[in-house]
Image (tube, grey):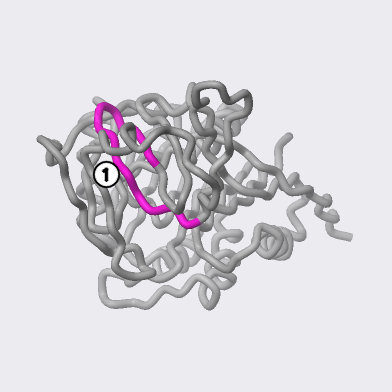
Amino acid sequence: MPPHPPQSSLHIVAAEPSATGGYALLDSGAGRKLERFGEVVVDRPEPQAMWTKRLPQTEWDKASGVFDGVDEEEQGRWSQRGQTPSQWNMDIGGVTAVCRLSAFRHMGVFPEQAPHWQWMADQLAKAPEKPRVLNLFAYTGLSSLIAVRAGAEVTHVDASKKSVAWAKENQAASGLEAAPIRWIVDDARKFAAREVRRGKTYHGLVLDPPKFGRGPEGEMWELFDHLPELMRECVKLLDPTFGFMIFTAYAIRASALAMDGLMKDILADKGGTFEAGELAIREMAAPNVMTPRLLPTSLYVRWSNKT
């Protein structure tokens, strides 16, 4: 009889200001969020911030970058005040990130991932040998860099040449040029399938897929259609003696319960422990406010076969 996966309850895991280095969520409300990335303050849309702003408008007016979206896929434009740098560095998670105002409202940094980074480092410390990590949909590579700092060898896969180039900039800014990272520009599904055929295994898998996307040769990615197949391939890549997975989903109209159910299904014969829930960022305490708010950002599921 295969081991029965344990039941998991849903959790809210918040990235605390003390763990996010040069980032801070200064305020949120009325469908917006006010954030500091290093020395640059930005004002971005956030539909889940349905409450009232706590800081006065004069503080919001100090933002040097204000993003206005033009469609549901997050494309839009930035309005800049003053001398906003074209790029700047900030420290987070023990590495250095090169930040930019991108057309997709991001700066290349997702500080809500800080709890994942610490959990991953804790898992890597338990590995019986030099750990191998596969980072799919790896974008600007902060998880890859944090993994190598924790002693892992990393295979970093993203379909975008620009994203991989950005990740390499972060590698250089972090002084990790000699780190054991294999940079791959490829479609995640095709790469995972090839690795399975090659008999490759990894101790850790990190997946942060978009809702929609295209591979370097025009391959289509749709989260709800293609994720189950990809996850089943990924399970075949897990080292049989030691392994963990981190899955994050920013897709709308999804549920942590659905993602938890998928992970339990594909890992049904692996045993281990599961944790599912939401990532959030804790807002900095406003004057005369006793309880800082939590701003939800994404769903996640984590699994490990070692407690």
Q: Which residues are magenta?
A: 34-47
Check the picture and name the quadrant holding the N terminus.
bottom right
- Residue 8 image position (x, y, % from top left): 78, 49
Residue 164 visible in the snapshot: yes
Q: Secondary structure at mark 1?
A: helix
Q: How many marks?
A: 1
42 falls in the magenta region: yes
- Residue at left 27%, top 52%? 67
Q: Is residue 41 left or right of residue 260?
A: left
User: Percent position (x, y) of residue 163?
Assistant: 26, 53
Relative side of 182 to 1, left or right: left
State the residue lying farthest toward the right: 1
Is 151 positioned to the left or the right of 123 in the image? left
Amino acid under disc 1: Ala
Residue drawn at 70 percent across, 46 percent down? 275
Residue 167 inside the magenta-drawn segment: no
Categorize mark 1 by other alpha carbons within 10 Å: few (<14), some (14-19), many (20+).
Answer: many
In the picture of the structure, the residue carrying the numbered disc 1 is 167
68 sits left or right of 292 in the view: left
In this view, the residue in front, 241 or 184, is 184
Residue at (68, 65) in percent of width and height = 258
- Say which of 110 and 78 sits in front: 78
Q: Residue at x 23, y 57 (%)?
A: 103
Viewer-proximal residue among 40 and 154: 40
- Residue 46: x, y in percent? 44, 53
Which sits in the foreground, 41 or 126? 41
Q: Is residue 293 above or below residue 300?
A: above
Above or below 7: residue 112 = above
- Assign the C terminus to one quadrant of the image: top right
